[in-house]
Amino acid sequence: MNDAHLHLLVNHFPIIGTIFGLGILIAGIVMKSKSVKNTAFVLLIVAAVFGFASMSTGEGAEELVEDMPSVGHDIIHEHEELAEKFVLVLYVTGAFALLSLIASVKKHSKATLFTWITLLLTLVTVVLAKEVGTSGGEIRHIEIRANAVSPEIAAPENESEHEEK
């Protein structure tokens, strides 16, 4: 198993964990359920840990794929830049989730404030998660790139090549 494989194994959880964490945290706030909010906090903390694992394997994955056809350094660099911003915000979100969890368990007077701060940070993190996930997908899925050529446009070129033979 190489770094590219490891990166693919761990890179989805920071994104999906943050999205689920947001949904569960909103549900916990609406339901006024301490245990549901605490579940969201734990999920956000775990997402931050997986963010670290994803960043740790990203450089090795880059080295393995950057010279592949249709990949290139530019698209990987863009993904890397977005990932660095995302993971920093994710670390802060995870730290506030930990603070919120501790405050909730200890019934601290600031527990509600920490919960709202965690919610706001999670909203920002989800937006960044979407961006980093899309840029990561574009590395190997050329069909989702903004400059992707549709099959209808590409078909006439292919047909003319076949006709000449």
Image (cartoon, grey):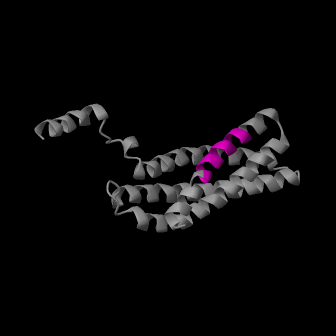
Depicted 149 relative to depicted 75: above or below? above
Quarter of the figure with the N terminus? bottom right
Name the spot of residue 138 as percent of width and height, x first: 41, 48
Q: Nearer the viewer, residue 87 or 6?
A: 6
Taking the view exactly as shown, the residue that stands out farthest to the left is 164
Name the spot of residue 6 as percent of width and height, x first: 56, 62
Name the residue at 69% across, 58% down. 95
Q: Is residue 24 magenta?
A: yes
Depicted 62 relative to depicted 31: above or below? below
Taking the view exactly as shown, the residue that stands out farthest to the front is 165
Task: Tell me the quarter of the picture where residue 49 sits.
Answer: bottom right
Taking the view exactly as shown, the residue that stands out farthest to the top is 152
In this rendering, would 135 be left or right of 86?
Answer: left
Name the residue at 73% across, 40% down. 24
Q: Does the magenta stretch include residue 79?
A: no
Q: Which of 136 and 97 is in front in this view?
A: 136
Name the spot of residue 77 as percent of width and height, x first: 40, 60
In this rendering, would 62 be left or right of 86?
Answer: left
Q: Please give the count of numbered marks on the rendered protein.
A: 0
In this rendering, would 93 be left or right of 108?
Answer: left
Magenta range is 13-25
Q: Is the magenta stretch mostly helix, strand or loop?
A: helix
Q: Nearer the viewer, residue 131 or 13?
A: 13
- Whether residue 108 is visible: no
- Whether residue 79 is visible: yes
Quarter of the figure with the C terminus? top left
Name the residue at 60% across, 59% down. 51
Name the residue at 41% across, 47% down. 141
Depicted 112 relative to depicted 90: above or below? above
Name the spot of residue 7 as percent of width and height, x first: 54, 60
